Image: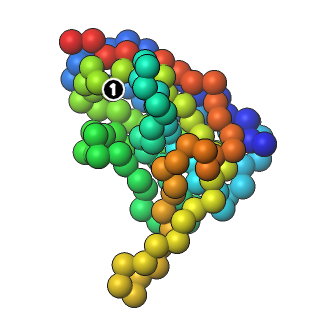
Amino acid sequence: QVQLVESGGGSVQAGGSLRLSCVTSTYAPTNNCVGWFRQPPGKEREAVALIPPGDNPAYYADSVKGRFTISQDSGTVFLQMNTLKPEDTAMYYCAAGATPLRRSFGRVSYLTPPADPTEYTSWGQGTQVTVFS
């Protein structure tokens, strides 16, 4: 099982930015999906941004499109969060280990990460993000 350690959370005023990092402390298979989920107080865990293996498009929740960017470099997964809103307040979790789904658009076939948190086998401890107005 992959060990994941998140950092970068904190408190920020609405409109501000934060950058989360997730370091993989053990070998992570390169054919699995990685990414970020969040769980607001009293609500279920939801997918925020996910990366499938290979040169395939990332997944973004509709609520964060255009504001958040996920990237990966040498075993570290980043989540750049801009124009933060109070509704982004949540515990943010890094996750890994999901098998990608194959989709087709016409003659083009590509991989997409599952948004169901139960598909992910490894989780970090979480980092709190609080956005105040």
Locate residue 8 relative to residue 32 in the image: left or right: left
Above or below, comparing residue 23 to residue 125 in the picture = below
Q: Residue at x 60, y 44 (%)?
A: 118
Q: Is residue 41 left or right of residue 97?
A: left
Asked whether residue 132 is in view, the answer is yes
Q: Which is nearer the eye, 109 or 53? A: 109
Q: Is residue 87 above or below residue 66?
A: above
Near mark 1 (Cα within 10 A), the count class, few <14, some 14-19 or many ≥20, is many
What residue is shown at x 58% (from left), y 54% (from top)?
33
Quarter location, residue 84: top left
**Residue at the spot 48% in from the left edge and 62% down from the top edge:** 112
Image check: 34 left or right of 110? right
Instruction: Kindly identify which residue carries mark 1.
Output: 88
Nearest the camera: 51 or 104?
104
Question: Quarter of the image holding residue 124?
Answer: top right
Is 116 positioned to the left or the right of 119 in the image? left
Task: Tell me residue 44's x, y (percent).
Answer: 46, 31
The spot of residue 80 in percent (x, y) is 39, 36
Q: Secondary structure at mark 1?
A: helix
Quarter of the picture containing the C terminus is top left
